[in-house]
Image (cartoon, rainbow, N blue to C red):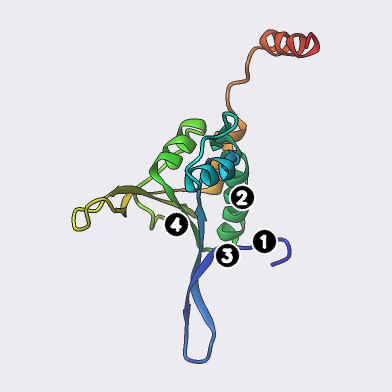
Amino acid sequence: MTGFGNVDFVIADVDEEGSIGQFLSVELQAIDIAGTVNDAYSALREDRQLEAKKTYGLNFDNVYKRYITQLIRKGYFHHHWGTKIVAVMQDVLYEYLRGKAEFMRTRDVRDSTVNIIFMSYSCADDPGNPGAKRFALSEIEGTSHSNLQQAVLYKEAPARKKFCQQISKALSR
């Protein structure tokens, strides 16, 4: 939708005439991987050694800067519509986001000030299927777009002197 973007899912009450009643958006978020694992995967499948060590990793910071901004923006629209957006992610990612932006949270997601709901899940061993994993709900918490925005924008700034030291270090490369 122009000016809003896409959402992964929408859950809506629709009456017999097709009119939309209440609705909420659902955004799923996975972790980004920096680099590529394709060469390592191919080597494993072909039972051969890698020619060089590959570098890749989980890119938590990229998810943070993109996803939090998206939730603030879309949460703002949901605030005006009197609806909510649900952010679904693995518990380790949610813990990371909370650590980066210590926003106010509540377990009362029905509160009228809550317009962003975080649902986190864990990936646990499946007791009924040895060697397999299953998803299990970990936590449900709510906040508002404004609380999330405040937590992101109004952090304590690093010392100017340290920033200048980093500039000098970069210039000497």
What is the number of the mark on residue 93?
A: none
Q: CA distance from mark 4 to mark 3?
A: 12 Å
Q: Are marks 2 and 4 in contact (CB under 8 Å)?
A: no
Report the side of 35 relative to 101 (left or right): right
Which badge, 2 or 4, comes first in the chain's sequence? 2
Secondary structure at numbered mark 4:
loop
Identity, as a three-letter code, of the amino acid under mark 3: Trp
Viewer-nearest residue: 163 or 126? 126
Which badge, 1 or 2, comes first in the chain's sequence? 1
Identity, as a three-letter code, of the amino acid under mark 4: Ser
22 above or below 64? below
Q: CA distance from mark 2 to mark 4?
A: 21 Å
What is the number of the mark on residue 70?
A: 2
Q: Residue 37: x percent and y percent? A: 56, 42
Q: Are marks 1 and 2 in contact (CB under 8 Å)?
A: yes
Identity, as a three-letter code, of the amino acid under mark 1: Gly
What is the number of the mark on residue 5?
A: 1
Identify the residue at horizontal 52%, vertical 69% (top origin). 10
Residue at the extreme right of the image, as rendered: 171
- Which residue is label 3 attached to? 81
Viewer-nearest residue: 43 or 153? 43
- Which residue is label 4 attached to? 112
Which badge, 4 or 1, comes first in the chain's sequence? 1
Identify the residue at horizontal 19%, vertical 58% (top origin). 128
Which badge, 2 or 3, comes first in the chain's sequence? 2
